[in-house]
Image (cartoon, rainbow, N blue to C red):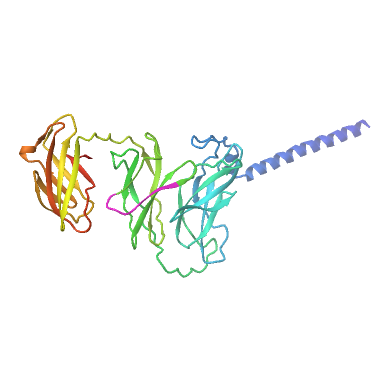
Amino acid sequence: MQLGRRSSGTVLLTLGFLTVALLTAMLAISMAAAPLSDVAYAAAPSPTETATNPGSPTRPSNLRPCPVPLAPLTEYGYASICWDPSSDATGVAGYDLYRLDADGFVLANTTTATIGGFSGVLNRRYTMYVVARDAEGHVSPPSALITVTATLGMTPTASPTPEPGDHTPPSQPTDLRDACLQDYRGVTFCWQPSTDNVAVTAYDVYRETATTYAKVGTVLPSGFLNFAESADVVVGQRYTYFVVARDAAGNVSVPSAPLSALAREGFPTPTPTCSVSYRTATWSSLLNAEITLRNIGTTPIDGWTLTVDYPASSVQLTSGWSADWTQTGTRLTGKNRQWNKVIPPGSTTQIGFTASYTGSQPAPVNFALNGRLCTVA
């Protein structure tokens, strides 16, 4: 009987060792099979709230092109991306993927995975970004932008016949530069023009907000491309912008590189030192302009040049008096004579000119004395 108890104990002990060994082996196999990235993500620290959107998930990161999940059954293309997962104190509920169109960013896909995409024109490049959402409705800051080409998928098929029309997007806007207008209060920046096979029709300006990229302005093509805003920015803070060019066919360029622009104080507006009263008499196609120039400052004006800007080039100077008058484009310029060179504070001098015009009678848009705008009495 004692020998039987020892044999039974030995068997149980042996089974215990075997069980421990088997569990150890299974644990080792499981750890070896788990991807290193998954293990690292599981051990990642909890997210921190963003200053602009408390309680939101972290920003999706590491956006990259991904293989199209399934070969499409049509000849349309498919734009597909992957990203690293966001984290959140209460858990991420899903991701929203936004695509850039001619009218701005539109919701293109919603998913709970970290891969997403949409159908599009084969070989066209699409720009997109991703935000994460949690169960409480908080939305993360937008991811960085990514531009990918729509492909046919993992299984090659015959190339489709291109649709007629203009499908060539403008080139990417480049060389964004901060503070191009130093005297402006707020944000200002400028950039180099894009090119297009037909013509660039507009430039759309986007600013990053707490949860999206908002279109904040549209600029028409010109020799000096610049953007300025003051109403929705705070002096001393930086804001991130990018610019997109588009053409008449609705093709949009790859967005410019982002620019971090500082909202500045701008130069103080100088107090006017002159006041102008302007009256005219007209006959036939001529106008006779009489200008009374008053010194409203506290010191004498010793030497002056008055500029008169008209909105149309139909005004043509014919003669003038009490000043030496010249014209450049739509601007008429009168320079003092020796006898009226000095205008004491509170004093006035009268000058004038005769000009021809076509169409309706034009009115000046501004008067400036020595480069500083005058008030109009």
Q: Determine whether 99 is above or below 366 in the image.
A: below
Q: Position of residue 108 (x, y in %)?
A: 53, 54
**Along the viewing direction, whichever of 85 and 33 lies nearer the viewer:** 85
Mark yes or no: residue 9 visible.
yes
Q: Residue at x 70, y 42 (%)?
A: 26
**Along the viewing direction, whichever of 7 and 252 lies nearer the viewer:** 252
Most extreme residue toward the right, as rendered?
1
**Along the viewing direction, whichever of 169 and 281 lies nearer the viewer:** 281
Mark yes or no: residue 316 visible.
no
Q: Position of residue 360 (x, y in %)?
A: 23, 56
Q: Determine whether 195 is above or below 161 in the image.
A: above
| Residue 18 forms part of the magenta stretch | no
Q: Residue at x 32, y 34 (%)?
A: 265
Q: Quadrant of residue 41?
A: top right
Q: Determine whether 357 is above or below 37 in the image.
A: below
Q: Residue at x 50, y 51 (%)?
A: 98
Q: Position of residue 303 (x, y in %)?
A: 11, 37
User: In the drawing, does residue 325 fall left or right of residue 206?
Assistant: left
- Which quarter of the rendering shows the N terminus? top right
User: In the drawing, does residue 354 fall left or right of residue 263?
Assistant: left
Q: Determine whether 139 is above or below 105 in the image.
A: above
Q: Quadrant of residue 266?
A: top left
| Chain part drawn in magenta | 214-224
Figure label count = 0
Most extreme residue toward the left, as rendered?
339
User: In the drawing, does residue 77 fall left or right of residue 197?
Assistant: right
Q: Position of residue 315 (x, y in %)?
A: 17, 54
- Which quarter of the rendering shows the C terminus? top left
